[in-house]
Structures are given as C-alpha cells and as structure tokens.
Image: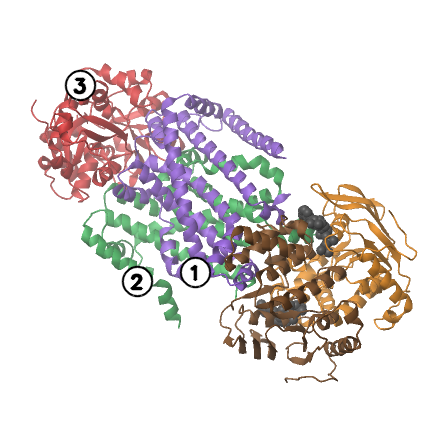
Chain colours: A orange, B green, C purple, D red, E brown
C-alpha cells in the first residue's frame, strides 16, 4: 500500500532525511519514533504530498505521490492551527465529509458520533478557541477518523491529552483502523505507545534521519491496555525500542535498511 | 446605561462643534462660516419640507435620492468585482503575474482624468458615473483581498488540500473566511471613498445630485451651502460606516472572540 | 521565478495595450475623444524628451515622496494608538468617519487658504487623504494579532507599550504595508488632482492643464500614463521591500507558493 | 522671497510677484511682458503660476499664495458680491471679439437657432461664468428664457465628446476647441458676444484690497510693464500667435487661424459696469456693484 | 510563596474551576495533573494574571494577583504560537532579558547558553518556522529558564519531545529550579513525570475542576532518571496518582481540600 524508498530531503543545504525506506502493507499500522528534530514531520509531509522531497520515491497503492493522494487524512502536530477558528468543532469535523457525498444531516450525525468517540459529545458546538489544547487535538483526531481515509497519517496525535484519554484514544484508533482497514503511519514520542498500537515500529536516527531499525511487533491483533502491556514480549520490545531511540544498536531481529 | 455609552462615544462631536463655532466666529472668514449658520442653512435647504416627506424638501429628494442609489450600486459592484478578482489573483500567482502591473497602472491614474473617457465610452451618464465610482474605489478592496487571500495560514490551506476540498469549498469555507477581516478593512475604506467618487462623478458628469450641488455652491461662492454639503457628506459617511460596523460585528463575530485578549 | 514574474507582467501590459489598440482600430470609439493607444504611447514617448514635462514630473515626484513619508509617519502611530486603545478609537470614530468621505475637491479650496506654498499644499492633501488606508489597515491588523503572542510578552512583565511595539507592530506590519501600498497609489492620484484643481508652477497636473488648453489629448493621456507607470514602479519597489522584511510572514502563510 | 525695496533701488515694497495665469489666449500680454523683460526693467520678477480657474485664483489670492491673478470679471464680481473677499482689478486683459465665444452644436443637431436652445442642455466651462451669462443674454434676445439647470459644467476639451454623445445639446466654446469642433462639422449657432454683449470685457488682472494697499508701488510697476505689453499685443495679432505655442499647447498652425478676443489697453470703469449691470439683470448678483471701488487704475505713464 | 485559595472560574455560564486551592512554598515544584479539558490551563492563566478569575484569590508572596506578577515566566501549552516568527531562536530567548537590564552581548550570551542547555546550540540562528515542533517547545523552555523568574509556570512543557530529550529536560528544570530557588507550577499529563519532578502532585478532578488530591512526593532532593524511578515509593506513588487521575479515590495520606 505505502512504499517509501530512499527518501531524501534537504531544507536548503540542511539535509534532514537521508535515505529513509519504509513499507506499510494494506491495513498495517506503522509507528515511527525518533529523536526530536530528526525529520519525522518532514517524512510525513512528504508522504502527504505537501512537500516535494529532494530525492527518493513515495508510492501509494503503486502510484507515485506527485500531488496530494486521494483518501488521505492527516492529524498535524500543530493541531491548533489546523482547525478553522470560524467553525464549531462539529463543523470542523463535518466539513471534509462533503467529499463523501453525505447530506447535511448525515454529515452532522457522523461528526457528532466521531466527537462522541473522542469524548467531546458536549463540545460539538464549541469553537476551537473555546477549547482546551487536548480538546482541540481530539477534534482533529475525530475529523481524521470520521473521514474514513484509506491512508491515515498522524503526527503525535495524543501529545496533549491525559493518560486515561490517551489510552482510550489509542484503543479507538486501533479499533477504527482495523475495522475500516486503514493503513496508518503514526508518529509518536511515547515508546510504550509505539509498541502498543503498532504492527511495526520504525526507529529513526538522529538528524539526518535514517532508519535505525524496523521492528515487527507481533503482539497479535487484539490488544488490551492492561494485559498487553504486561506481556513479556511487550516489555522486551519496549526496552529494545528505548535503547534504539537512545542511539544504541539493535539486538533483536532488525530489518536494517542501511 | 445606553445613554451613558452613547455620550461616551459621541462627546467629541459637541466639543469639536463648539471649538469650531468659536474659532470661525473669531476668524470672520467668509470661507469658514460658523457651524450654526451652516446648520441653519442645511435645515432651510433640505429639512423644511412637508411633514409627509419627513420634512425633506423637494431639493433634498433630488439631491440625495439618485446619489444614494448610485453610491450603493457603485459600492456593491466594486465589492463584488474587487473581492472576486482579488481572490482569483490572490490564489493564482500566475494570474497575479500577468495582472499586477496593470492593476498598479490603473490605480495610479487619477479617476477624474478618466471620467470623460468613460463618458465617451459608455455614452450614458449613469453607467459612466457607476464606472467612475467602481474604478475609483475598487483598489483598497482588491489589494486587501489579494493580501488576505495570499496570507491564509499555511496549515489551514494544507488541511483543505489533505481532505481534498473542492475548489468551491476551499474558497467559501477556508479562504474567504480567513481573508474576511482584511476584506472588511478594504470594504470599509471603499465605503467612504465611494462617497468621494460619487461627488467627483456627479461634478464631472454634471447632472443633479449632491456633487452637482456642491459644485454650484462653490461656483457661486455660497460657502454656507458648500459647508452644508460637506456636513451632509460627513454625516452620510458616519451613518454608512456605523451600519457597516454593525454588519461586520455579525459576520466577524468569530474573529473578534478568537482574537480577544484577556 | 522572479524572471517569470517580470515576463508575465510585461506580457500582461503588452496584451492590454494591444487590446486597447485593436478596440481603437475598430472605430468603436471616436478617436477624437479617446485617442488610439498608439497615439497615446507616442505622446508618452514625446514627453520623455520634453524638458518641461521632466521638470514637472520631478516636482510631482518630490511632493509625492514627501507626502507619503509624512503620511506614514503620521498615520502608522495614529493607527497604532487607535487600534491599541479601543475607547479612544470609539471616541474619535465619529470624527474620523465624518472626515473620511470629504472629497479632495472640497479639501483643496480649504487647503489653498491655509497653505500658501504649493508644495505644502500638495503634501497636506496627500497626508489628509492617503492616511486613511494606513490607519484603517493598522487598526484591523492590530485586531488580528495572536493574543497568545501578546500574552507571552506580558507574562514576562513587559508593559503595554513594549507589547505594542515588540509584538503587535511586527505582527501587524505586513498588513500595514499593504495599507501603505494602497496609500502610495492614492498619493499619486492626489498629487495630480491637487495640481489639476489648485494649479501651481510645476507638476504633472499643471502639464495636463496646459495640454488641455491646446486640446492635446495624446499629451494629457501620455502624462496620465506616466503617472500610472510611476505607480507601478513605486509598488514594485514597496513589494520588494516587503519581501525582504516579511519573509517570516510569507513562509507561514500561503504567500510563499 | 520678499526682497526689501532698497535692494532694487526702485523703492518697490516687493520685487517678486507670484502671478496666476491660465494657459489661454487671455494671458498672452503677461507672457509677452515676461519674455521681453518689461517686468525686469521695472525691477520686478514675475513668477507665473497656472491656476485652474477664477475660483481657485480668488482662494489663492486670499490665502496669500498669489499676489496677482488673471480672473474673469463675472466670477470675481460674484465673489465680491457674495462677500468672499474684497478684490481690485489692476489691469484689463481680454475682451470679447467676434468669433471668440460661440455656442456650437454637432453636425446633425436639430438645433438651428438660438430659440431652439430653449430647455436644451448647454455645456459651459464654468457654471455662472461669462459663458453662461452671455448665453442667457442671447437666448433672451431670441425671446426664450434660460433656466439655471439647463447649464452643465464641462471642460473645453470634453465638450466635443459631450456633444457627440448627446450628454449636452449645445456647448459654449472658445478657441482652440471651436476650430476642432468646426473641423468635425459642428455648427455655430450664435456668437455669444453680439448685441448687448458686443465687445464685453472678459478677464483682467486682479488682486485683493489688502495686497493692493500693502504693495502700491510694486503693483504700479506691474501695471506699467503689463501696459506696455498690452499695447504691443493690441496692435499686432502676430505677437500673440508667436507667443501662444510657448505657454500653451496650442501649436503654431492652430494659433495662426483661431479667433482671438481683443486686448484692451485701458481699465475702463464704464466698460466693466456693463458686466455688473448684466449680472444684476440676470440675477447673478443681488445688489448694485460699485465697480469703481474694484478698480485700481494704472498710474498715468 | 504561591497561595491559590478557592479559585473559581467560569467562561460565561460554563464553570471550569470550582474552588481550587493550592499552595506552593518558596522553591517548591508543584505538579498539577488532571483530565484533558478540566481547567489546568485556566488555573495557570489565573495565576499568571492573564485572566481575572470569577472568584477566589491568588496570592504571590502575600500580594494578591491583580495584574501580571513580577518575575514570572510562563511556558505556554501552545508553544508554537508564543514564539515570535520574525525573530531567531536566540532573539526569542534574549528578548525578555531586556527587562533584566542586560546589554546586547550579555543577552546574547545568556540566550546561547540556555539554548545549549536544551540541546539547541546549533539552532540559535534558526527562525521558529525552520524548527520542528519539539525544537520550538525547547526554545520556549529555554526562554523561560534564561529569564530566571522567581515563579515559573509551565503548561505541558515536554509534550512534543522524545523520551530521551524529555528526561534531559526534566533534569534540567529540576537543576535550574533548585539552583535559583524558583517556585514552579508544572502542568503535565505524564504521571511518571509528575512524581519524578514534583515536590508535590496536585490531582484535579474532571470538569469543573476541584482538587482531588494533593500528594507530597517525598523522594528527596536528588533524583536520578533510573534509580529514582525504581524506588518502591516512586512506583507506589505513581500508581496512586494514576488511580486518582482515573477518578478513583485516594488511599494514602491525602490533604483533601474539598
Ligand atoms: N521549513 C523549514 N525550513 C528549514 N528547516 C526546517 C524546516 N522545517 C523543518 N526544518 C528542520 O528539519 C529538521 C526536521 O524537522 P521535523 O519537523 O521533520 O522534525 P521532527 O522529527 O518532526 O521533530 P519533532 O519531533 O520535534 O516534531 C529540523 O532540524 C528542523 O530544524
Ligand atoms: N476562551 C474560552 N471560552 C470558553 N470556554 C473556554 C475557553 N477556554 C477554555 N474553555 C473551556 O474551559 C475548560 C477548561 O479549559 P482548559 O484549557 O483550562 O483545560 P486544560 O485542563 O488545560 O485541558 P488540556 O489538558 O486539554 O489542555 C474547557 O472545557 C474549555 O472548553
Ligand atoms: Mg514533528
Ligand atoms: Mg491546557
């Protein structure tokens, strides 16, 4: 479904991505972790077709990305700037659904349902600037999920919410993605999270980013916040990813690309 | 409470009037009649009519009726054209490349010089006057709209592109609302300019209306009449602007609230 | 990129001139009243070697420059004050809205009585009428400043004045600059109009009055064309300055495409 | 700019005069006087400045940016009557002559005689000016009454187009537009300056009472110098023809054929009184105007 | 030093803070945790004098807060909007130092040093829009720390950085606050973090916010990312806070206020 091959990107003379290759099969959820400023958001923007990378290739469903791909949804890291301040939360969520050919009532219903799922049933008629940071972030998650894209890109989508909400949202994303077979690329700083939600975890090196490791998670499809996190495999993988992010080298089966 | 607020808002008016009255009485310059004389003359000219016509005299109807109609038509036309063209140019760097120099060429040519040619071109006086007004006031609307359109927050645009908004959606849901505060600044500027251009158009097309009255007053050295016209212009400007601000408060409510500091 | 822009601009102007010439050639418009574009261009070219016109143009240019400088110096602070102090803005709004629609045809006779020097007269007319776009745009731009940006500086204990100068002014600057560009174009018109209406010793408007005396439409329109070209040049210069100063603004918005 | 009198040696209170002119044939004598150095000979420097019209000239005189200006009598008398200021004419400049002020219509106009102008729109270059006054006079002579609202203001260059487009039915023109319109087939309906208005004074040089009493010697010097030029011009049309292309954009060929007015050499109270009387008769002014008080005759030289 | 008493705040008719009382002694670091949208940012803005709360009192050094207190620094949740895009990172950091009466060279030195501490030595001359989310967040932390305020308010300051950087920043804040005796109020969603950096942890309830618990941490002054987190006391407290955030009631010594 998604094939990133040898992606290179430089801002001016400053090389940020230095040959990154990542593959995601249909319906797979790939987590990307890496140090701050290493180039994760740049990677995501290249996949979304928002920037034209300096080198390498991105294929989605076999098609090269030369404009914004169809059926794509993105949750931006800077979520507050991606909501429209002149619209209520419900309208922000409902707006993209016009493309889905839904009539006004159905759009409204879908939006309300999505907001409900992220715990914002009460806030449907609030404007973004009347909401807390975490609420805004959840609105943009609800917008992406309600859209039912075939490719979902999320840049630290749970950074501004409390632990409980975060877990709920993780489970929500797992459920929705599995149910609709969305292919998902999720950038996160939380190593636990990457292992918990990912089918695979890709670790990037410090800038310029290369793939330090590409680890299959292999925890099965049904995950549970308490049971899964207590599995031995989970704990081991978490430690492994942690070490890799800290710059150590991999000890387990790693599909090193470079 | 409302009275207090109104007083708070309008206190400068009587103060200015009194200062002006005292100053003009002291100066005894025929060109600067005291405001009391001007107001008296205005009443005589425009407000001594039958009660059935709200006291408006026949002359008032002649002076204001067609003028106001031209003013609104001109402003509305300029708003539609300016906003539409501004959005098109703001969205398309290519189009702006072609048109930019022409725009700046056009807006630096004095409209009074062009009126005779509009007249020659359009033969009829009303379309020529409307053209004059539109040509004179469209620039702030156009430039502010271009600026507003070009400077929509990048992430707003990216979000629209990601979700594959149609062009119409992108315009009506993202670009126009985002540019609206700036467009309104342009529309507000254009509203007062429209009054100015109306006067110029009426003077040059030479037939009836407030501008024509102003011209005759100047030509016959009837300075109180002339000041009366200026006062009416000012009052009209104030009223139009107040109405405009009311509309703006409704349309831009989100903006005011989103941008308020505590 | 820059190259392409210039080429497109030239193409646009050339296209317009050609279209005007074609319309003229069809005889749709009597060329006694609106001379053919080629005639106007010839008139405009003649002016280039006309010492009298060059002197007139220099005089108008000087008045324009001085007037615009003074306009900016007056109206940016005024706009800042009005935008930053809503009660003041509300108090003077009736006065401002009263003054704004008073046309220069009415202002100029007034100004003649007050200013005996022709340069001062034109400068005063510019300052009066070209200030509004800057004042209004400044007020609107100040309303658009991100409240969090202001709160940040306030939280560090900076006073209102510092917040105004260090946060509000830079944030508002790009839109104020647009106001200045509107004003620069208006100022060209005002100089010429003031010269047409009030007369004087030198100026493009004076030249036009003289051309009118000989019924030389080609020269009148040629002079107007130069005024327009001057508008284009001044705008280009201002845009270049804006590009340098406000790169930070462009990259965060759609402008940098 | 006001150099003291002692430096010039002539005892002038002011050696530099700012003089308002209009680029029309009326001001030819002034240009001649400048070119031939008549002012310099009197120790005067005259700085000519273009004014857009009589109304602006009165403003500029009152505001002090001009010392003397060309001004049509009708406009100045009106200003004086309305109390806009107190003015004094110091020299006559231009008077009516056959063919210099005419009412024209376009080629295929149904208007044939002055009487046909009844109720028709007539363009004048300035409202309530001598053009309008004389048009009213001619209509009255023809037995029809003019109403103020049938006159509209158009600049001379715009008049042919206004006629052609039908915005006006007739236009009161002067040169060089008369020549232009004639070439296009326009017809002259009437010479405005015939009958009661024959050789009517048109324009002269005037100043304010204040300036006249403050700088009597400088004004006298101005009058002497201008008088010389006026006398030259009055005798020889060629001088005007040569001068016109230098201060207007009327080319030599046109200058040679256009109809010019007369250049009177004296400031005659009785002649000016005709203007004031006509104005009163046609309701331009309410009171009898004391023309004598508005004249500062040139010193006998 | 900081005394928040019965703080109440409503946006219109929507009550957000419902009688919150928190005390912080001089030099103390108090962590505030609570569900998303409960009113933490509102609390912080009230303390900073940016909003006038509907009821209750905030005293700083015995003085009621009726305007912005002196010697205050705030790291806002929406860090990207609080940096000035027309200034480089170094200038953003240096700007507040004008109030400290430092000359240009000294300001520049202090700014460079602070950027170095947050790992951005190379980025001093970058503009905010040339930086990644995490880098921007670190600039705003550097700005607050360089200012050396006596009261430091931080709203989720480490939300956008990777695990390693986060730990470094936690230690940095601990070190700087201790060294300069800053009183600190730190809002966080990370329960581990609240226990690790806090002298006390205040848990707020779901909206409208009240104090659910005010727990002294008592882990001593010197903390270590590995050793401290393995302490029994740490693990117990973490679990306790976790339960409280999830809405359970406290089982240990809690200074319940309401
Ligand atoms: N517009 C830009 N111009 C120049 N440099 C940029 C730009 N955007 C990002 N960079 C640089 O590219 C690098 C990678 O940025 P990116 O935003 O991709 O990082 P990231 O991995 O998302 O970091 P974080 O986790 O902190 O969000 C950074 O060093 C940043 O300075
Ligand atoms: N300007 C505002 N107008 C109206 N309501 C607001 C405003 N700001 C915040 N609120 C409401 O107040 C409540 C608390 O907001 P606050 O930002 O304090 O939450 P928070 O605890 O910081 O949440 P988070 O952890 O998600 O940042 C929210 O329900 C929000 O909707
Ligand atoms: Mg990022
Ligand atoms: Mg918050």
Label 2 marks a residue whose chain is: B
The residue lying furthest to the right in this view is A253
What is the CA distance from the residue labelled 2 to the residue labelled 3? 62 Å
Most foreground residue, A158 or C36: A158
Vertical placement of residue C68 versus B189, above or below: above
Asked if both marks, 2 and 3, belong to the same chain, the answer given is no
Residue C229 x, y percent position in the rendering = 47, 32
Task: Using the numbered discs, state the Cα–Cα distance from disc 2 to disc 1 in whole angstroms.
Answer: 43 Å
Provide the residue designation for mark 3. Answer: D234
Is B26 left, or right, of E89 in this rendering? Answer: left
Secondary structure category for the residue under label 3: helix
Label 2–label 3 contact, CB within 8 A: no
The image quarter in which residue D248 lies: top left
Identify the residue at image location x=33%, y=15%: D253
Answer above or below: position of C21 versus E117. Answer: above
Left/right placement of residue A173 relative to residue E61 reads right
Q: Secondary structure at mark 2?
A: helix
Disc on res. B51: 2
Where residue D121 sits in the image (x, y, percent)?
32, 37
Q: Residue C129: give x, y in percent of width and height.
A: 38, 45
The residue marked by circle 1 belongs to what chain? Answer: C
Quadrant where the N terminus of chain B sits is bottom left
Q: Residues within 10 Å of mark 3 (few under 14, many from 20)?
A: some
Residue identifier under label 1: C85
Residue at mark 3 to residue at mark 1: CA–CA distance: 68 Å
User: Does the Cβ of the disc 1 residue fall within 8 Å of ligand 2?
Assistant: no
Residue D222 in the figure: left or right of residue E43: left
Kindly identify which chain the residue marked by label 3 belongs to.
D
């Amino acid at each position: 479904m998604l094939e990133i091959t040898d992606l290179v990107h430089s801002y001016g003379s400053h090389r940020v991505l230095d040959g990154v290759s990542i593959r995601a099969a249909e319906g797979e959820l790939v987590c990307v972790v890496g140090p701050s400023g290493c180039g994760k958001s740049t990677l995501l923007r290249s996949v979304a077709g928002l920037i034209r990378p300096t080198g390498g290739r991105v294929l989605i469903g076999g098609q090269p990305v030369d404009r914004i791909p169809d059926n794509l949804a993105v949750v931006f890291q800077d979520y507050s700037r991606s909501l429209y301040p002149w619209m209520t939360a419900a309208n922000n969520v409902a707006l993209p659904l016009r493309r889905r050919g839904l009539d006004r009532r159905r759009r409204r219903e879908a939006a309300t349902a999505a907001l409900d799922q992220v715990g914002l049933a009460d806030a449907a008629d609030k404007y973004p600037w009347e909401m807390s940071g975490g609420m805004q972030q959840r609105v943009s998650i609800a917008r992406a999920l309600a859209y039912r894209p075939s490719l979902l890109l999320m840049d630290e989508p749970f950074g501004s919410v409390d632990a409980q909400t975060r877990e709920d949202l993780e489970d929500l994303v797992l459920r929705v993605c599995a149910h609709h077979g969305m292919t998902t690329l999720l950038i996160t700083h939380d190593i636990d999270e990457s292992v918990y939600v990912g089918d695979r975890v890709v670790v990037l090196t410090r800038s310029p980013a290369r793939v330090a490791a590409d680890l299959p998670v292999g925890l099965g499809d049904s995950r549970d916040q308490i049971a899964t996190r207590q599995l031995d495999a989970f704990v081991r993988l978490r430690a492994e990813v942690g070490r890799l992010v800290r710059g150590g080298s991999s000890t387990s089966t790693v599909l090193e690309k470079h | 409470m409302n009275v207090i607020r109104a007083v708070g808002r309008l206190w400068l008016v009587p103060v200015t009037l009194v200062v002006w009255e005292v100053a003009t009485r002291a100066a005894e310059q025929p060109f600067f009649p005291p405001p009391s004389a001007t107001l008296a003359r205005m009443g005589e000219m425009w407000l001594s009519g039958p009660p059935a016509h709200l006291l408006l005299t026949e002359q008032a109807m002649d002076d204001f009726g067609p003028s106001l109609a031209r003013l609104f038509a001109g402003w509305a036309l300029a708003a539609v054209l300016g906003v539409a063209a501004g959005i098109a140019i703001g969205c398309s760097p290519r189009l702006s490349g072609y048109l930019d120099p022409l725009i700046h060429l056009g807006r630096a040519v004095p409209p009074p010089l062009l009126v005779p040619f509009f007249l020659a071109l359009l033969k009829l006086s009303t379309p020529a006057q409307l053209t004059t007004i539109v040509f004179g006031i469209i620039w702030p609307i156009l430039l502010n709209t271009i600026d507003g359109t070009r400077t929509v927050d990048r992430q707003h645009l990216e979000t629209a592109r990601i979700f594959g908004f149609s062009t119409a959606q992108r315009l009506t849901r993202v670009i126009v609302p985002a540019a609206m505060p700036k467009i309104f600044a342009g529309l507000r500027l254009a509203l007062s300019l429209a009054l100015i251009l109306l006067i110029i158009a009426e003077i040059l097309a030479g037939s009836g209306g407030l501008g024509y009255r102003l011209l005759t007053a100047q030509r016959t050295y009837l300075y109180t009449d002339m000041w009366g016209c200026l006062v009416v212009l000012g009052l009209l400007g104030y009223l139009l602007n107040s109405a405009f601000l009311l509309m703006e408060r409704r349309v831009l409510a989100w903006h005011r609230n989103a941008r308020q500091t505590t | 990129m820059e190259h392409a822009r210039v080429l497109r601009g030239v193409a646009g102007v050339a296209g317009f001139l050609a279209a005007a010439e074609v319309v003229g050639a069809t005889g749709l418009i009597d060329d006694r009243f609106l001379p053919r574009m080629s005639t106007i261009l010839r008139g405009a070219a003649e002016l280039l070697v006309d010492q009298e016109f060059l002197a007139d143009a220099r005089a108008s240019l000087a008045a324009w420059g001085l007037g615009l400088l003074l306009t900016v110096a007056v109206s940016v602070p005024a706009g800042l004050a009005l935008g930053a102090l809503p009660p003041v803005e509300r108090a003077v709004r009736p006065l401002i809205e009263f003054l704004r629609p008073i046309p220069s045809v009415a202002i100029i006779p007034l100004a003649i009585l007050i200013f005996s020097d022709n340069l001062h007269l034109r400068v005063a007319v510019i300052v009066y009428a070209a200030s509004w776009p800057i004042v209004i745009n400044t007020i609107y731009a100040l309303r658009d400043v991100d409240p969090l940006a202001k709160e940040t500086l306030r939280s560090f204990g900076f006073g209102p004045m510092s917040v105004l100068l260090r946060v509000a002014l830079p944030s508002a600057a790009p839109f104020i600059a647009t106001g200045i560009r509107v004003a620069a174009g208006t100022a060209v018109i005002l100089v010429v109009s003031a010269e047409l209406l009030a007369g004087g010793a030198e100026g493009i408007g004076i030249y036009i009055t003289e051309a009118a005396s000989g019924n030389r439409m080609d020269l009148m329109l040629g002079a107007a064309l130069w005024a327009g070209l001057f508008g284009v040049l001044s705008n280009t210069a201002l845009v270049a300055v804006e590009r340098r100063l406000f790169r930070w603004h462009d990259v965060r918005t759609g402008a940098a495409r | 700019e006001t150099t003291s009198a002692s430096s010039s040696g002539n005892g002038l209170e002011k050696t530099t005069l700012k003089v308002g002119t209009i680029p029309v044939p009326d001001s030819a004598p002034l240009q001649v006087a400048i070119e031939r150095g008549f002012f310099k000979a009197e120790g005067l420097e005259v700085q000519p400045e273009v004014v857009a019209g009589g109304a602006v000239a009165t403003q500029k005189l009152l505001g002090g940016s001009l010392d003397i200006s060309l001004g049509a009598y009708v406009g100045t008398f009106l200003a004086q009557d309305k109390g806009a200021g107190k003015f004094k004419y110091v020299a006559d400049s231009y008077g009516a002559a056959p063919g210099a002020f005419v009412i024209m219509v376009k080629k295929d106009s149904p208007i044939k005689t002055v009487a046909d102008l009844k109720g028709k729109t007539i363009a004048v270059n300035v409202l309530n000016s001598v053009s309008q006054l004389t048009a009213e006079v001619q209509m009255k002579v023809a037995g029809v009454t003019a109403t103020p609202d049938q006159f509209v203001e158009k600049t001379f260059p715009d008049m042919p187009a206004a006629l052609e487009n039908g915005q006006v039915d007739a236009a009161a023109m002067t040169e060089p537009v008369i020549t232009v319109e004639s070439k296009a087939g326009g017809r002259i309906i009437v010479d405005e300056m015939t009958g009661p208005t024959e050789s009517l004074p048109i324009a002269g040089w005037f100043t304010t009472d204040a300036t006249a009493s403050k700088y009597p010697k400088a004004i006298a010097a101005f009058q002497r110098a201008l008088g010389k030029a006026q006398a030259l011009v009055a005798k020889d049309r060629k001088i005007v023809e040569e001068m016109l292309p230098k201060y207007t954009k009327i080319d030599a060929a046109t200058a040679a054929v256009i109809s010019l007015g007369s250049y009177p050499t004296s400031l005659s109270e009785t002649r000016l009184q005709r203007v004031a009387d006509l104005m009163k008769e046609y309701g331009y002014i309410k009171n009898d105007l004391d023309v004598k008080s508005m004249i500062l005759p040139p010193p006998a030289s």
